[in-house]
Image: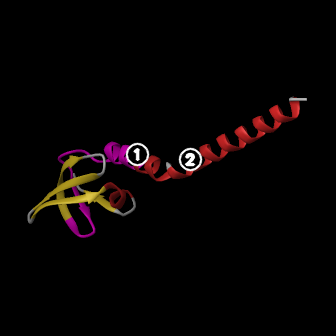
């Protein structure tokens, strides 16, 4: 009669694996979202473009995994990609 024990262990193991997968999926949601935003920013903006973001005008100097660097008359400005993708940006060149 080890069939009942085997069934219970299989059920418990399945529930634990499901709980782990669900926790991992929910925890990785922000990371995956940030990766997709970076992909979008790299396809949309290019180094050398002149953009205007929240009344700040500058030339895109670099696009990293987490931020875009603008060269402005006042100096360098580092903007998180999250802010760029969630706001209106005017591309001039």
**Disc 1 designates what residue?**
35
Q: Residues within 10 Å of mark 2 (few under 14, many from 20)?
A: few
Q: Nearer the viewer, residue 51 or 69?
A: 69
**Which region is colored magenta?**
35-56
**Disc 2 designates what residue?**
25
Task: Please state if 61 lies on the left or on the right of 3 as rendered.
Answer: left
Query: How many dots with numbers?
Result: 2
Q: Residue shown at 34%/48% (left/top)? A: 41
Residues marked 2 and 1 touching at CB (< 8 Å) = no
The quarter of the displayed image where residue 86 is located: bottom left
Q: Residue shown at 8%/63% (left/top)? A: 73
Q: CA distance from mark 2 to mark 1?
A: 15 Å
Which of discs 2 and 1 lies nearer the camera? The answer is: 2
Quadrant location of the N terminus in the rendered image = top right
Q: Position of residue 79 (x, y in %)?
A: 26, 59
Q: Position of residue 24 (x, y in %)?
A: 55, 46
Q: Residue shown at 83%/35% (left/top)? A: 5
Q: Nearer the viewer, residue 27 or 81?
A: 27
Task: Please state if 58 lies on the left or on the right of 26 as rendered.
Answer: left
């Amino acid at each position: 009669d080890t069939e009942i024990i085997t069934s219970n262990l299989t059920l418990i193991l399945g529930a634990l694996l499901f709980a782990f997968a669900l926790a991992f999926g929910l925890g990785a949601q922000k990371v995956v979202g940030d990766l997709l935003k970076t992909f979008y920013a790299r396809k949309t903006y290019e180094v050398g473009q002149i953009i205007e973001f929240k009344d700040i005008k500058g030339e895109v100097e670099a696009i990293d995994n987490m931020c875009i660097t603008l060269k402005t008359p006042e100096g360098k400005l580092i903007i998180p990609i999250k802010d760029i993708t969630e706001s209106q940006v005017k591309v001039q060149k």
